[in-house]
Amino acid sequence: TQLLEQSPQFLSIQEGENLTVYCNSSSVFSSLQWYRQEPGEGPVLLVTVVTGGEVKKLKRLTFQFGDARKDSSLHITAAQPGDTGLYLCAGVFPNFGNEKLTFGTGTRLTIIP
Amino acid sequence: DTGVSQDPRHKITKRGQNVTFRCDPISEHNRLYWYRQTLGQGPEFLTYFQNEAQLEKSRLLSDRFSAERPKGSFSTLEIQRTEQGDSAMYLCASSSRQGGITEAFFGQGTRLTVV
C-alpha cells in the first residue's frame, strides 16, 4: 500500500509568521500535487511538481519536490487569514496504465489575525 | 465548460434507502475519479475510470457501492441500502494526461447524511 504522510496534522499560527508543512512517502512519485480545501468545498489544485529538486512559487507559497521524488514541502511566507484551510498533497505513483491519485491525510492550517 | 459539476450538493436519506450521485467532468478529460472524505481526513480513493472503463475499485468499497461511466462522459455513483457510516462528502475529479503529467480537478462534492 502506497501511503502519504503529512505533518503537522494541525497548525495554528499568528498572521505574519512563516510556516512549512511536509508530505512524505516511502515510494517514488511520478508527480505530486498540492491542493487547498475549504470547508464544504472540493479541493482546489495549487501546483504540480514533477522533477526531483523542483521549486515552484505561487505568490507567498513555495513548493519544493525532494531530489528523490519521495517528499515535498510547502512553505508559506507572511501567512494571512486567507491562507486558512486544509492543505492536501496527492501523488501519482508509477504504475503503468493507472493514474490513481493518492491523497495524504492533510494539514489543517489556521491563521490567527 | 466551467469545471467539474456534481449533483446534488447535499443529500439526506434514511438508513436503508438507495442514493445516486452524478458527476459531469471537464469535457476533454478522459479520466474520472470518485473519492470519499470524512470530517478532518484526506480524500479516500473509491474508484477510477479511464473513458468508460473502470480501471480500479478500492477494496474498502463494499458491494453496496457501484459506479458507472457510460460512453465515457458523466458518471454516477450509487450506494444501495445506505448505512450511517456512509455519511461523508463524496468528491468527483477529472483529469487528462498532458506532457506526461496528470492533474486532477475536483467538483464541489456531494455531502451525504444518512439518518
Image (cartoon, coloured by chain):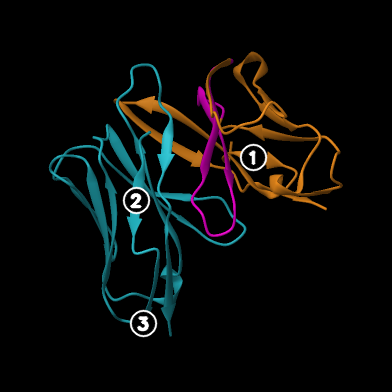
Marks 1 and 2 sit apart, C-alpha to C-alpha, by 29 Å
Which chain is tinted orange? B
Q: Which residue is mark 1?
A: B5
Task: Return the x and y of residue A3 as percentages of the image width and height.
Answer: 36, 41
Whole-percent x, y for residue A57 in the image: 24, 56
Tell me if label 2 and label 3 are in contact, CB under 8 Å: no
Q: Which residues are magenta?
A: B27-52
Mark 2 surroundings: few (<14), some (14-19) or many (≥20) residues within 10 A:
some
Magenta stretch: includes residue B72: no
The answer to which image quadrant residue A74 occupies is bottom left
Displayed quadrant of residue A60: bottom left
**How many C-alpha atoms fall within 10 Å of the one at disc 3: few (<14), some, or many (≥20)?**
some
Residue B112, image x, y percentages: 73, 48
Whether discs 2 and 3 lie on one chain: the answer is: yes
Secondary element under disc 3, as helix, strand or loop, is: loop
**Residue B113 placement, left or right of A112:** right
User: Any magenta on residue B36?
Assistant: yes
